[in-house]
Image (spheres, grey):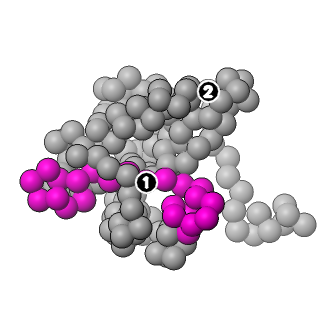
Amino acid sequence: MIRPAVPADVPVLIDLIRELAEYEKAPQEAKATPAQLHEALFGPHPAAFAHLAVDDETGEPVGMAMWFLNFSTWHGVHGIYLEDLYVRPAARGRGHGKALLRELARICRERGYTRLQWWVLNWNTPAIDFYRSIGAKPMDDWTVYRVTGDALAALSE
């Protein structure tokens, strides 16, 4: 079962985010606090959204999709940027990841959005194989750029 996250889900979302950071070999990077996540998802001006994959038998959350809206100037409409897709290892292979992506694709179609987009680490071949199996295409002509830390501070001056 896939369902939108509710405020009571913030602790499990934090756990899932930390598990994902561990899987991606960057546990020190997962710094979001429960208060920050609650504000981003459920504050007066939500900037992000989340869905949970819940085990049908136990009712326990086994995965998540964290996402936000992006915008295509070429298409003139929003799209969904999938920030994190994560399914706990014990629950993989049972369709939870595909169900989460299917829900986001459904939201795109329902709202007239033309894109569902995300990044994947180059070494994450299980994820890459899965994404290709559902028809996702890599954007090989594009390079991701990011400004953070001291460079961000210097740029802002």
Which of the 4 quarters of the picture holds residue 13? bottom left
Q: Nearer the viewer, mark 2 or mark 1?
A: 1
Which of the 4 quarters of the picture holds residue 155? bottom right
Q: Residue sitting at 40 percent across and 31 percent down?
A: 106
User: How many numbered circles does the render carry?
Assistant: 2
Q: Report x, y in % for residue 35.
A: 51, 76
Residue that lies at the very extreme toward the front in this rendered image: 44
Whether residue 140 is visible: no
Cα distance between the residues tagged 2 and 1 = 29 Å
Q: Which mark is residue 50?
A: 1
Q: Closer to the N terminus: mark 2 or mark 1? A: 1
Q: In terms of secondary structure, where does tag 1 sit? A: strand
Q: Residue sitting at 38 percent across and 57 percent down?
A: 5
The residue tagged 2 is 141
Q: Report x, y in % for residue 157.
A: 90, 66
Magenta range? 39-61
